[in-house]
Amino acid sequence: MRYHPLLEGLRINEDGSEIIFFGQKLTGKKINRSARPTATHLVNFNGRTLSVARLVCEAWHGLAPDRDHNATRVDPDKGFHYTNLFWAKKGVNPNYDQIKFPRPKSSKIPESEIPKIVERLKNGETLKAIAKEYGTSYMSISRIRKRFINGED
């Protein structure tokens, strides 16, 4: 357990599972802000709401360099351990390209069809034509193009 550098009386363990404020254990609240399976954990105390990631990062790595930085997870699936956290500019995760997010189970396009769609896109077929054939939206095909073609620099 470490004391927080600014918040007097706040102690936090290395992964944020135990947060104690003047001897009273605080419980966090899990919030999903997007369709991704990772969640944000928030804790309320002393009239404030703060993220567990920020508290852990401040206690173990020091304060953020400036207000444009957030506590960011190296791998979103590996929790809030201080070794999985670092300060990064808001909206930027330099490790994002290495993270493999699972495709949604509700996808109409089977995984086996993606290479065929990529080849058709490379041959110049329109998003709309391919989407119509698979019974999905052109945006689904656009996401495949963005993920598998535009990322091939």
Image: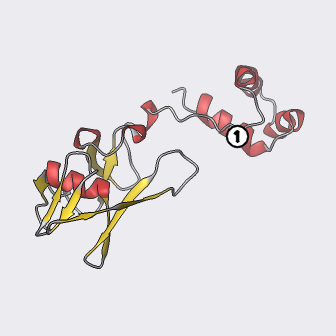
Residue at position x 81%, y 30% in the image: 125
Q: Quadrant of residue 131?
A: top right
Q: Quadrant of residue 54?
A: bottom left
Q: Which residue is mark 1?
A: 142
Q: Callout 1, which amino acid?
A: Ser
Q: Quadrant of residue 152?
A: top right
Relative image position of residue 135 (x, y in whole percent): 87, 38
Residue at position x 36%, y 56% in the image: 90
Residue 72 visible, this angle: yes
Residue at position x 89%, y 33% in the image: 133
Residue 149 visible, this angle: no
Residue at position x 70%, y 40% in the image: 142
119 up-or-down from 141: above or below: above
Q: Is residue 118 left or right of residue 38?
A: right
Q: Is residue 66 left or right of residue 112?
A: left
Relative image position of residue 141 (x, y in whole percent): 73, 37
Mark 1 burial class by Cα count in 10 Å: few <14, some 14-19, many 20+ = some
Residue extending farthest to the front is 24
82 up-or-down from 25: above or below: above
Closest to the observer, 121 or 111: 111
38 up-or-down from 116: above or below: below
Q: How is the image coloured?
A: secondary structure
Q: How many marks?
A: 1
Relative image position of residue 72 (x, y in whole percent): 33, 48
Closest to the observer, 153 or 143: 143
Relative image position of residue 24 (x, y in whole percent): 20, 67
Instruction: Classify mark 1: helix, strand or loop.
Output: helix
